[in-house]
Amino acid sequence: MRIIIYLLVLVFPATIWAQGRFDDVEITATKISDGLYMLQGSGGNMGISIGEDGVFLIDDQYAPLTDKILAAIKKLSDKEIHFVFNTHYHDDHTGGNENLGKMNIDIAAHDKVYERLHSQNVPKEALPIISFNDEMTFHMNGLTIRTRFYPNAHTESDSVIYFEGRNVIHTGDLFEQSGYPYIDIEAGGSFIGMINAVDNVLKSIDDQTIIIPGHGSLSNKAELENYNMVLKKIYDELTPLADKGLSIEDVIKLPLLNEYKDSWGKGDIRGETFLKFAYNSILKERK
Ligand SMILES: [Zn+2]
């Protein structure tokens, strides 16, 4: 039996299995303003700036999609990609790093994204070649592209990218526009940290700001405010339960999140799964 399995693995290496999943994925480009686009395929939303200096790319989804992503960018600009910036380490945002690194495109990210990817033993080419600890600014295509670090939120090291003067931002996965957010507690994520990070982002934007969320459709400040209001409401419902010492099993049995069943409940992350992240995060903070 074992031999048969080995043979199957030899005949169908993992890359081919993985490829199948992405065969039908199309990369679409949504214009935001002159030279700024959101790209979508499968995985985290990408953002790009194109212009006289070249292409600045935010995130790169999964490795099997790299050729499609490059083709989509080619349709918009014949200039070279200078940088890819990773908003955080998750593979639906960094899976294309190795392919792009092998093309000598410079990968930039927060120090902790570098550390996390390095600890996962990814190939050298998939690692950021530039990393930063607080803020970093790119000067390209006549833009000031400022990247800011938000600790312990969706992960231990989330960045938000501000296209200053154009009033466009990319939030990475601090903002899940289409459902419950994922909180990667194992990698330093925190529910209250996420709420605080979004509060800080909200202070830096205005009613006209166009937001590229980590997942979902183009958005705005009103939607981000509503998102954070819902997160705060859930946080305020869960903290007294933690005070009472309820276990996660008890919490899941309660009629929580019912009002979001037809909205966030239809997203990728189930309400019950979200409750587990959220409640475990609250319990962890009390230890
Ligand atoms: Zn993520």
Image (cartoon, rainbow, N blue to C red):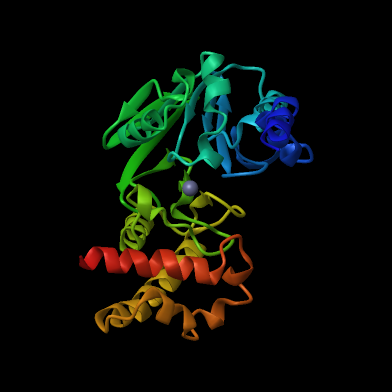
Q: Is residue 268 left or right of residue 25?
A: left
| Residue 230 lies in quadrant | bottom left
Look at 58% across and 21% down and name the residue there: 99
Q: Is residue 139 left or right of residue 269?
A: left
Looking at the image, is 265 positioned above or below residue 215?
below
Name the residue at the left extreme: 287
Look at 65% across and 28% down and name the residue there: 66
| Residue 161 lies in quadrant | top left
Rendered location of residue 16, percent (x, y): 72, 30
| Residue 136 lies in quadrant | top left
Number of numbered discs on residues = 0
Q: Is residue 124 left or right of residue 57?
A: left
Rendered location of residue 223, percent (x, y): 51, 64
Front residue of this view, candidates 1 and 10: 1
Rendered location of residue 37, percent (x, y): 61, 38
Is residue 26 shown to the viewer in this render?
no
Front residue of this view, candidates 192 and 170: 192
